[in-house]
Amino acid sequence: MLDLTFETPKPKTIAGAKHDWELVIGMEVHAQVASQAKLFSGASTAFGAEPNSNVSFVDAAMPGMLPVINEFCVEQAVRTGLGLKAEINLKSAFDRKNYFYPDLPQGYQISQLYQPIVGEGEVLVEMGDGTARRVRIERIHMEQDAGKSIHDMDPNMSFVDLNRTGVCLMEIVSRPDIRGPEEAAAYIAKLRQILRYLGTCDGNMQNGNLRADVNVSICRPGAYEKYQETQDFSHLGTRCEIKNMNSMRFIQAAIEYEARRQIAIVEAGGKVDQETRLYDPDKNETRSMRSKEEAHDYRYFPDPDLLPLEIEQAWVDDIAASLPELPDDKKARFIKDFGLTDYDASVLTAEVESAAYFEEVAKGRNGKLAANWVINELFGRLKKEDHDITDSPVSPVQLGGIIDLIASDAISGKIAKDLFEIVYTEGGDPAEIVEKRGMKQVTDTGAIEAALDEIIAANPAQVEKAKVNPKLAGWFVGQVMKATGGKANPKAVNDLVAAKLGL
Amino acid sequence: MSIDQSTAAKVAKLARIKVDEEALPALAAEFNTILGFIEQLNEVDVEGVEPMVSVTPMRLKRRADGVTDGNQQAKVLSNAPDAREGFFAVPKVVE
């Protein structure tokens, strides 16, 4: 296995006034399942609809309405579990988590506390410096999302939209294996990448389709290792949970702030209270959500409206057989089959669409050359205009055509860049464009020789200088390139110049 | 298990049911009667017995993933004491 070659990264250390401290982080990631309809109703999950238009009477909790589970949501949860190398529980069950809030009309959220659908798995989090953290997954369960409250439309009222109410979420719970803000961000990024490969969540953090609750505690160096040996939490500090963050940058800033806050409390002889906190990006601080504390008594009980969810091993096997190639495997294959560097393979496999694009370009061609063109030229150009690979004006066939022209010496690398720009802005078949616009590289030594002879004849002084100082031969090469409109084969020109000047 | 007055008050608060101070002793006593009755079940040995979730051998009913419901904003809001611009309007709740 590829991952065995990774070293474990060093945990982040923060120097307090008295000693050094380490961070211990566990995350609960809420990922919205990519499905057409909600978990227990037939209302749409589409984002950005008219308020309260994607709402069935089940979602609105009208009396007498009963939940009926969406089988595809179950399939997506199982697929996610398999993608995280986790055990799948053939029997799981739904529980009610009771609390009152205006955007939760049922007065409870249907969740899976006691018997989740997915058990223990893992995520390999590469840090980009050759190290990688193996983060254990404790469980994944399915649950309903709540609605949305808007507080800024009226000074005295809150406005409630139930469109999101009842949309299926997967809550992916990690063990406290993450050891710093950067690792936390890398973990989210890796999880997002896997979910997008699997197609089980679109990973859109801005829309809140992927968001995280982050548990942070601090400990003295050495204590964490004792926890790992014994799995005894008493070796770790008291944790605080920072709720509902949907930006990698804020997650890192919040962890950093929270760790320093806890260090200050403990070093001053105080005690950290286990509590739920909220991160305020404007002030860059976390603050206590005291109102949540009392409500923490959720009085879970099995949902009497829903029988246990029993699935068959054969069905799970079918889903397993349909899993796509996952990021770690794809990256390893790109390195091996196309001779790419670790970095290039990471860039190309970051998004499944980029990987597919690259593979189409690289098929039957030089992998490294293809990687260079996709990463440096295409990605660079797309980024400039804030385009995604999926709306690239240059198709893999067109880019492959350009690379073929370079590989066959039909055009020079410099002309290839001009050609790329033409294909990008105007479209068309690269080979045809080269033919029509006379961009072909001049490899005919006769033509190059003629041009060179003219230049030599016109510049006797330069010839004398170059014979003394061979570095000046470059001037002749430049003049020939200029005379041929950049189409002369640079290697042929170099050779001829050297021969003619007798260097 | 025995329920005292403060537990009764807490349960009432969590359930958002207003209970007057003077009604709490009677409420606590009533809880205790109910729990006492249920506690008799503890006498039954259920070691190794699977919990029964249904009296008929039924499988959880499933639904295909398709949009079959919704687009009824007016109906959804029709029972709301206050609704504005397609939203339920409720007294301000801010964290």
Image (spheres, coloured by chain):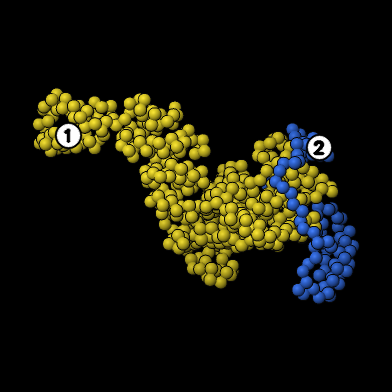
Chain colours: A yellow, B blue
How many neighbours does mark 1 have within 10 angstroms: few (below 14), some (14-19), or many (20 or more)? many
At horizontal 18% and vertical 30% (from top left) the residue drawn is A449
For the residues marked 2 and 1, what is the alpha-carbon distance in whole angstroms?
Answer: 85 Å
At horizontal 82% and vertical 73% (from top left) the residue drawn is B42
Determine whether label 2 and label 1 are within 8 Å by CB: no
Q: Secondary structure at mark 1?
A: helix
Left or right position of A95 against A243: right
Can residue A297 be spotted in the picture? no
Q: Secondary structure at mark 2?
A: helix
The spot of residue B46 in percent (x, y) is 79, 73
Count of picture labels: 2
Amino acid type assigned to the residue bearing label 2 in the image: Lys
Residue marked by disc 2: B75
Residue marked by disc 1: A497
**Label of residue A207 in the image:** none
Vertical relation: A458 (above or below) A154: above
The spot of residue A98 in percent (x, y) is 75, 55
B93 or A336: which is nearer to us?
Answer: A336
**Chain where mark 1 sits:** A
Amino acid type assigned to the residue bearing label 1 in the image: Val
**Chain where mark 2 sits:** B
Can residue A308 be spotted in the picture? yes
The spot of residue A340 in percent (x, y) is 39, 50
Quarter of the figure that contains the C terminus of chain A: top left
At horizontal 84% and vertical 62% (from top left) the residue drawn is B55
